[in-house]
Each structure stands twice: as C-alpha cells, then as structure tokens.
Amino acid sequence: MSKKIAIYPGTFDPFTYGHLDIVERAIKIFDEIIVTIALNTKKQPLFPVNERIEFIMDATRLIPHVKADCFEGLLVDFARTKNAVAIIRGLRAISDFEFEFQMALMNHRLDQDISTVFLMPNEKYTYLNSTIVKEVVEFGGNIDNLVTPLVASKLKEKFKS
C-alpha cells in the first residue's frame, strides 16, 4: 500500500497557529503532509522563502511526517512530482469557500487523480490569517497566542520602530 501524501499550499507569510491546526488535522488523515510555499510573483511577502520554511519546520517539529517545500507554477504539477493524492485547503469562513471551490474544480480538471480536501480550523482560529497577525504586531499588539515564539520574535524585529 502506497503512502497517502497531501500537499498543504499557501504563502505562509508568516505561518500561524491556524496553519498549524490544519496540519495537525491533516496528519490524522494522511501519511505525510508537505507544507509548501507557493511562490507568487503577485504578492510581496514580508519574509523570504527560507525564513518561511524555517517557521514551518519549527512549528511542525514535533509532528512526524511533515515536510516543508516551495514551488512555482501549477500546484497540480508540483503535487504530481511528490506523488500526492490530495491538496489540503483550510476554510475559515463562508467567504473563503467560493474562491477555494473554483480552485478545487480547476485543479480537478487539470488532474483528476488529485483530490482537494477542505478542513476547517478550530473555531478559535477562524478569524486568523497572516495579514491580521502582521497588522496586530505592527500596531504593538500581542501576537503570542497567534504564532510560534520564533515567528513572534521575527515579526517584532521586522516592525521595530
């Protein structure tokens, strides 16, 4: 029986406890999770790819069979190279669904052997996203319960006045 590998793509700028919650849920379903940073030229990330990979590896260090990677191009092409059977997507709110549904349908059209699995985070993370975390730290708010200590430290460095 082959391993069931899933890809969890995102920008992860930065990786939050909401993202970690999705990984913890996904690893109960799949044998291996590859958290992968989508290199998107339309976005200007705060952190370079190597730091975001470090954030992912730090946050998931106690979860076996989780890897970090990055890719450019079509997600299904990357998933195919990793022998993945699924793409994991987190749904925080109804507002996420329409875009995610369209992407899932297109990915299915591109490769019918790769399924999209939608996971909802714990309700305490339904409001959480990387943009909100950056805004909170920028204005001096406490982010310790939103991100790992490593991410909190790096964010505070970035937003020092």
Image (cartoon, rainbow, N blue to C red):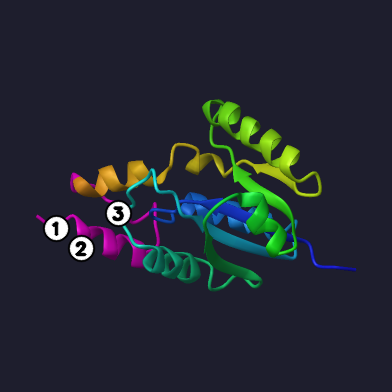
Quote the CA–CA distance across marks 1 and 3: 14 Å
Q: Which residues are magenta?
A: 139-161
Q: Is residue 85 left or right of residue 136?
A: right
Q: Amino acid at mark 2?
A: Glu
Q: Is residue 66 above or below residue 44?
A: below
Quote the CA–CA distance across marks 3 and 2: 12 Å
Image location of residue 77, percent across then percent down: 66, 54
User: SS at mark 1?
Assistant: loop
Specify the farthest residue to the right.
Answer: 1
- From the viewer's side, name the closer residue of 48 and 92: 48
Question: Which disc, if any, is residue 46?
Answer: 3
Are dots 2 and 1 in contact, CB under 8 Å? yes
The answer to which image quadrant residue 66 occupies is bottom right
Q: Is residue 156 left or right of residue 128?
A: left
Q: Amino acid at mark 3?
A: Leu
Are dots 1 and 3 in contact, CB under 8 Å? no
Q: Is residue 78 above or below residue 104?
A: below
The residue depicted at 27 percent of the width and 58 percent of the height is 155
Image location of residue 61, percent across then percent down: 53, 73
Image location of residue 71, percent across then percent down: 53, 59
- From the viewer's side, name the closer residue of 26 and 141: 26
The residue depicted at 32 percent of the width and 48 percent of the height is 44
The residue depicted at 60 percent of the width and 54 percent of the height is 8
Q: Amino acid at mark 1?
A: Lys
User: SS at mark 3?
Assistant: loop
The residue to which callout 2 is attached is 157
